Image (tube, grey):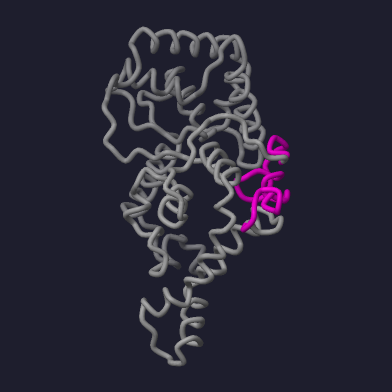
Amino acid sequence: MRVLRFWNNDVLQNTESVLEVIYNQLLPHPNPLPKGEGPIKLPLPLGEGRGEGTLGEGANTSPLPLGEDLGEGYLPQITLTNVAANLIHATNEDRLIHAAQAQVGKEEVTDKEIQKAFKPKADELIKPFHNPDLRELIETLRKDTDQLIDDSADELITAGYDEEKAEVLIQNWQQFIQDHKNELDAIQLIYQQPYQKRHLSYEQIEKLADEIQQPPYNLAPIEVWKAYEQLEKNKVKGVPPKELLTNIVSLIRFSTGLSDVLEPFTELVNNRFDNWLKQQNQNPPPPQGEGRGEGAQG
């Protein structure tokens, strides 16, 4: 927004919050925004869940004490939703341009003319922020919902799993396999059963995936995968998505000797499909009408 200086990139990259910028740049008070962490002295049901937006259901809909009891010059009772809506609508660039055009009576307007037309509205918009209780309330709610993103490069402290931890994970995984031989038989049959029956085996996989996370194992397939990567790195190819249910299929194939390499199940399927395509290209089917024998000609 070219009209409001406090929305520029310099401010967004600053450590100050938008509220602090509004208060420090626009309000005619020399004192900085209060940074106290004490309780907010406002009769608002702030602890009752979260409603629309990020300010909480109570804070979003309850009227703010901005009336006569807080001193002359404050607005009548309004809600935080009203405050936000007024800021959004009043700073709409098209509206600002139209207001300036109406004021100067011409189509082309300058930034200075837009600022001049916006000045009375800006004075009205910032009136709620003269209320110190409102400023403190919004700043506290902001701190409660803010997410800090650090773009600086991470410093590597430790790499991968501790070897001892990896060994314990593998031992627990092997114990899990030993304790679920019957289910493992069903999983292995997934490669032998007709397609129509495969959903039964997938149900078994889902059951195993749930059981492995329960006591006494308390394991996640992705953690077991990383443990194998730590101990047998030359046999592990890549790390699959954490939530992929078929991780457990690859782990079982590798742990029981069905596969010499631990690789994501999707990669295994893709490799098999690629090999099948190569075989089809090397041995193309005979042209239609050939290879039918003498009987086909008669």
Rendered image quadrant of residue 228:
top left
The residue drawn where x is 61% and y is 39% is 194
Q: Nearer the viewer, residue 99 or 198?
A: 99
Left or right side of 167 for 57: right
Please name whichever residue, 75 or 236, is drawn nearer the observer in this view of the structure: 75
In this image, 25 relative to 218: left or right? Answer: left
Residue 63 percent across, percent down from the top left: 72, 51
Q: Position of residue 62 (x, y in %)?
A: 73, 48
Q: Camera-side residue: 263 or 209? A: 209
Query: What residue range appears in magenta?
Result: 44-73
- Quick check: is 202 in the magenta stretch? no
Q: Residue at x 55, y 63 (%)?
A: 125
Residue 259 to residue 271: above or below: above
Find residue 9 and report its horizontal and vertical position in percent: 34, 57
Q: How many marks?
A: 0
Q: What percent of the width, then of the height, locates residue 216?
A: 59, 9
Left or right: where 33 falls relative to 43: left
- The answer to whether residue 286 is left or right of residue 242 is left
Residue that sits furthest to the bottom in the current view: 106
Asked which quadrant contains residue 153, the reply is: top left
Q: Quadrant of the N terminus?
A: bottom left
User: Up-down: is 37 above or below 58?
Assistant: above
Q: Is residue 49 magenta?
A: yes
Relative to the observer, which residue lies in front, 217 or 101?
Answer: 101
What main secondary structure does the magenta stretch of the protein show? Answer: loop
Q: Which image quadrant for residue 204?
A: top right
Residue at the image position 41 percent from the left and 37 percent from the top = 268
